[in-house]
Image (cartoon, helix red, strand yellow):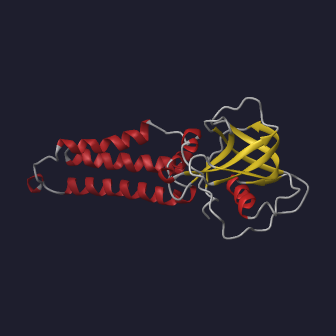
Amino acid sequence: MNRLAQTALLFLLGATLLHAGTTDLYLRYVKEGLRPLVLLAGAVLIATAAATLWYDRRTPAEDQHAHREPRVSWLLTLPVLALILVAPPALGSYSAAHTGTALTKPFGFPALPSGDAPLRLAVADYAGRAIYDDGGSLQNRRLKITGFVTLDRKGTPYLVRMGLNCCAADAQPVKIALTGAIPPVLRPDTWLEITGTYTPRRMKDPVNGGPIPYLKVTTARPVPTPHDPYDETWNT
């Protein structure tokens, strides 16, 4: 790998990061709040490639070293090609079914808005209030929650969102078990908008023994995958 190839690789990687950061592609890898850092990294790599090329053109040929880098350095192109050619799907039902719930006790429970309309909650918000507040703020409220479906080995259906600390590598699920008017056919990874009510019923996650609350389903309808499939509220 000569200097020109190194420069091209830097530029290609930087351009790929800029592309990911200016579209929703970066959400497959990192949390939404890291978009500025992805864009900054892309810009720095492109600037480095431009500076390297400028330096290479300015330096007389007789002053440059005539050796090449080891051939193994071409393996550095593999991550770049993976970013360009493969857009991995967001983690879904398989990961959720094989990973225990990551629900943790929140620092507090902000007051919920009043009204008769269904209250929209995140999966982690409902689970936290149901388990650690014993559903105190959820009594007699119609709730609307969106997540994807996963099933355990016994066929128990869960509504799930994967939470991130920083990136997809550390994603962990928060689960809600479903009861009530459950659709007769549920396919894993289907995104549903559930309207339902709180129930004090709960269970232990068969993977790690963590607490999982139930939600009594009134209606359920399929919805498209959200632009950001990960949930960042569970660890705030």
Question: What x and y, as percent, mark residue 176?
Answer: 70, 48
Residue 155 position by quadrant: top right
Judged from this view, the residue extending furthest toward the right is 116
Q: Which residue is drawn at 37% across and 48% down?
A: 13
Q: Is residue 5 left or right of residue 170?
A: left
Give the camera-side residue of 82 and 151: 151
Give the camera-side residue of 146 and 184: 184
Question: What x and y, as percent, mark residue 137?
Answer: 82, 63
Residue 102 position by quadrant: bottom right
- Please identify the quadrant where the N terminus is shown: top left
Q: Which residue is drawn at 16% across and 45% down?
A: 70
Judged from this view, the residue extending furthest toward the top is 185
Question: What x and y, as percent, mark residue 129?
Answer: 74, 61
**Number of marks in the image?**
0
Give the camera-side residue of 68 and 185: 185
Residue 122 position by quadrant: bottom right
Question: What x and y, as percent, mark residue 85?
Answer: 43, 36
Judged from this view, the residue extending furthest toward the left is 62
Q: Residue at x 90, y 59 (%)?
A: 115
Give the camera-side residue of 86 and 152: 152
- Please identify the quadrant where the C terminus is shown: bottom right
Q: Which residue is drawn at 63% across and 45% down?
A: 227
Q: Is residue 228 left or right of residue 213?
A: left
